[in-house]
Image (cartoon, rainbow, N blue to C red):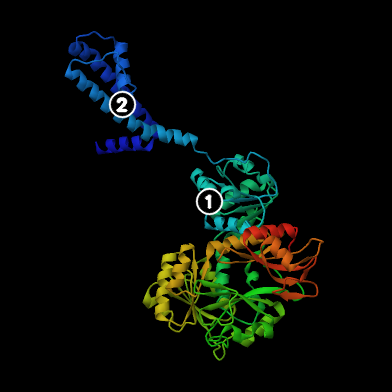
Amino acid sequence: MRDRKGTLWRLFHGSRRVKAVTYFLIFGAQIAFYTLLFHYAYPLLEGKPITWPASLLFVLETVTTVGYGDLLPFTNQYTVLIVILMMVSGIIQIFMVIPLLLIPTIGSHLQPSPPQRISHEMSGHVVIIGHNPITRALVESLLISELPIVIVVDQKETAFFLSDLFGKRVYVIWGSYQDNATWEGAWVKKARDVVVCEEEQTTASIIIGIRAMTGARIIAVVDKLSFERYLRYAGADTVLSPKHVTGQILARHVALTSHVDTLVEETVVVENGSQKTPAAGDPLRIINIPILAGSRAAGLRLGELELSPRFGAECILISRRGHFSFFPGPGEVLDTSTMLFLLIRMSSIEKLVSDLFLPTGKTEVLGVVTGFGDVGRSAYRELTALGMECVVVDQKPYPVNIVVGKAEDEETLLEARIREADFCIVALNDDSRNILTTLMVRNLNPKTRILARANDAASVDRLARAGADYVALLPSIGGQIVAGVLLADTVYIILSLPNGQVIVRGRYSTGIPATVSSIEKSCAVRILGIQGKEKSIIYPDGESAVHAGDILLVMGFPRGLRKFIRVTQRDLL
C-alpha cells in the first residue's frame, strides 16, 4: 500500500501534465456536482421550475463571479447557503488552478528558450565546448579581443545560466554532443578554433565526432597530460593541462635560482609540447620574485633595493598574502610574505637575482608537497629538477620521498619534517582540506613559506587568511593559458591582475607613427614598456615615439585592450 501511494505521489508531483489533467478533472466534477444539486434543490426550495441549461449557467455565473440576476431574489435560506458554498469552493478552486497550473504553463511558453543553433552564418570564431570554472575564466580572458565566441553545452539549464551570465557578449547554444546538428548549429566547419573543456572520455568522443567536420585547430583542456597521446590520435592539435601548469607556477613562486627561464612568467605556457622561445635581442620581461629569508632584500624597503638605477627594473605590483599593491612606493617593507612583480630587461635578470634575492649562507632547501595529484606531481618534478629536497604527503604510496597519510593530520606533517621545511606547497584537490592544512602548517612552522592551490575564487581569501603566502587559482590560470594560445596571433597575455586588468604584449603595426600619450588616451590603457630594434624603454614618458614594428607592453581593462588591438591591427610578437 505504501509503495502504491509513493508511486502515485511521484507520478503526480513529477509530471506537469498529470497535474493539469487532475486539476481539470476536479474542477469539472465540481461544476457537475453543483449543477446537479442546484437543478433539484431550486424547485424544492424556491418553488419554481428550472432547466438543466439554466442550472449550469447559474453555477458558472456563481463560480466565475461574473454576477447574475435572473433567479433573484431567493426566498429560502437553504438556497442562499448552497449559493454561498458554490462561491467559496469555486473561488478556492480557481485560485488553486491559476497559480499552480496556468501561470507556470503560460510562463514556460513565454520564457525564451536557449537556441540550439545560430541562425546566421558564422566564420573565424572560437567554439568552446563544455561548462566549468575554466570555461568561464577562458571567456573572461578572451574578452580583451573582438573574437566571436560560441559556447556549446549539452544541458538546457546550463545554457540558460550561461546566457544570463555572459549576456550578449557570447553566443550560447545547447544540444547533444552525439548529434551532428549541434555542431552544424555552432558552425564548427567554419570555426577558427575549437576548445573542448569536458572530461577526458567525453572530450575524446567529441573530437572524433567533429574532426572530419572542420579544419579548425582543436584544443583539448584536460586534467591529466597522460591522455595527451590518445587525444592527439583522436584529432586534437593541442592538449593543455591547467593542473600541470598550476603546479609549475607554484614551484616557480617558491624556487628562486639565477636561471632566467625559471623566473620569466611566460615560459610556463606550454604549446604543442614546447616552451616559447624568448625573442632575440634584449626583450622586456615581467618576472615574479619571492622575498626569501636570508636574502639581502629581506627586511629592506623597496626604495633601498635601487632597482631602477642598478638594474633598470621597475616594480609594477607587490603581492602579500592575498593583498595587492599596484606601483608601490619606495617605503614598502619587504618581508618573507612579499612577492615582487618586476618589469626588467632580460639581460639584467640574473645579476638582479644573484645580488638581491638569493639567500646567503644556506645551500640546502627542504620543501613539503601535500597532495601528489596532477598539481602536486608537477610542482614536485619542477622542484626536484632544480636539486631541491622535497617530501611528499599523500594518502597513497608513490615511488618518491613520501610520508603516507592525510595532509591535515599533525603527526603526518611532523613526520614529513614540516618544522624544518623552508616551504610547503598545499596542492590537494579540495579547498576545505587545503584551508585546514594551511592553518596547521602555519601553526607548526610560522616561518615557512606556504603556497596553495584553490579551485574556487571564494577560497583565495580564506587561504590567505589561513596563512598562505601565495594562492594559485586553478580556473583563472587555466583560462589564461588557453586564451594565450588562442590569441597568439593578436596579443600575448602575460599576466591577469586581481583588479580585472590584464598585461599583454603586442606589436604596433600601423604605418602611422604615434606617441605613448596618444595611444594611452585613445585606448584608455597604460604602456609599461617599448621594445624596438635599438631600444628597450621601461615606463616611457608621454612624448616617447612609437614606430611600426615596436613591441608594446600594455596594461588595461578588457574594453581598452580591445581598442588597443584595433589600433595596432591585431599583430603580435
* SS at circle 1: helix
Can you give x and y, in whole percent of width and height, for residue 103 in the image? 41, 34
Q: Earlier in the sequence, mark 2 or mark 1?
A: 2
Can residue 198 be seen here? yes
Q: Residue at x 40, y 80 (%)?
A: 444
Q: Position of residue 481 (x, y in %)?
A: 61, 63
Instruction: Give the quarter of the figure containing the N terminus.
Output: top left
The answer to whether the residue labelled 2 contacts the one labelled 1, judged by CB atoms less than 8 Å apart, is no
Task: Single out the mark in the foreground, 2 or 1.
Answer: 1
The image quarter in which residue 344 lies: bottom right
User: Going 32% across and 24% down the picture, which residue do you hit?
Assistant: 65
Query: Which element is circle 2 on?
Result: helix
For the view shown, which residue lies furthest in the right direction? 511
Identity of the residue drawn at 64% across and 46% down: 210
At x 65%, y 78%, the residue is: 314
Is 65 on the left-hand or right-hand side of 551? left
Closer to us: 198 or 74: 74
| Circle 1 residue | 165
**Mark 2, other Cα within 10 Å: few <14 / some 14–19 / many ≥20:** few
Residue under label 2: 26
| Figure quadrant of the C terminus | bottom right
> In the rendered view, does 403 fall on the left or right side of 348?
left
Above or below: residue 153 compared with residue 490: above
Tell me where residue 143 appears, x and y as whole percent: 62, 56
**Vertical arrangement, residue 124 with respect to residue 373, above or below:** above
The answer for how far apart the CA atoms under marks 2 and 1 are is 42 Å
Amino acid type of the residue tagged 2 in the rendering: Ile
Q: Position of residue 270 (x, y in %)?
A: 64, 66
